[in-house]
Structures are given as C-alpha cells and as structure tokens.
Amino acid sequence: MDNCIFCKIAAGEIPSKKVYEDEDVIAFHDINPAAPVHFLIVPRKHIPTLTECGPEDTVLLGKMAALAPKLAAEQGCGYRLDGDGKPSGGFKTLFNTGPDGGQEVYHLHMHVIGGPHPWRVKFVQQ
C-alpha cells in the first residue's frame, strides 16, 4: 500500500525505535505509549485488519503471538514466577479491529503493553 505508514516503517522509509525485525515482522515502540512499555508487532505483509486474515496467515499470527512474551521480557515487563511461585510482571496484547474496535492504522498490528500500574500497587497494598 503506497500510503500505509506501517508499510513505510517496515520498508525503512520512516524511522522507528525498533525492538525487533526479521523477514516477516517488525516490532517498534508506539509513538503515543499508553504504558511504560508499549510497542507494536507488525507484519511486513499488508493486511488491513484481523478480519482479513485467512488460513494462509495462521503461521504469521502464531509468530506474532509467540514473539510477544519474548519481546515483553526483553523490554522489562515479562511475566515471571518468584521462588515461592508468586506471579509478577506481565503485559497485555491487543488487536484493535475496525472503527468500533479503536483501530486507527489499517495495517494489522498487535499492541504489547506492560509495566507497573500505580492503581494495582494501591489495590495490592490494601
């Protein structure tokens, strides 16, 4: 797509703060982060929305899902268990689809969002 910002980022025409890239996907920090850690995993293949994914995209979607925990851990918000088995850390993954789903850029992308939440600390301390 000639006018797709994510296609241009994937092609190196627009700079980004990259987290990861290979022949299938690129991951980079969101320019308007919603949390301390907020990056996107974007396929190089232009797919407008999750709805347009077909059986031929199953491997690509699986790769994106498998990359999320690895990259989240590298960015400091991985999920882990302490020595007593107590969970800590963590992140959220999100695909926005269509206008009612909050999608702003019509190129499939997975948000990976994590980091400390002040409200959670208050809730746990009570």
Image: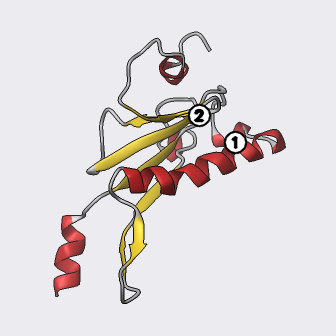
Nearer to us in this view, 43 or 67: 67
Q: Which mark is residue 60?
A: 1
**Residues at badges 2 and 1 in contact (C-beta under 8 Å)?**
yes
Q: CA distance from mark 2 to mark 1?
A: 8 Å
Q: Is residue 117 above or below residue 88?
A: above
Q: Give the residue drawn at x 66%, y 27%.
A: 45
Q: Which mark is residue 77?
A: none
Q: Describe the element under mark 1 as helix, strand or loop.
A: helix
Q: Judge from the rendering whether residue 44 lies leftward or rightward of residue 26; answer left or right.
A: right
* Quarter the C terminus occupies: bottom left
Q: Is residue 9 above or below residue 39?
A: above
Dividing the picture into quadrants, the one containing residue 2 is top right
The amino acid sitting under disc 1 is Leu
Estimate the x, y position of residue 21 in percent, counting from the top left: 52, 32
Residue matched to label 2 = 25
Residue farthest along the front direction in this orientation: 83
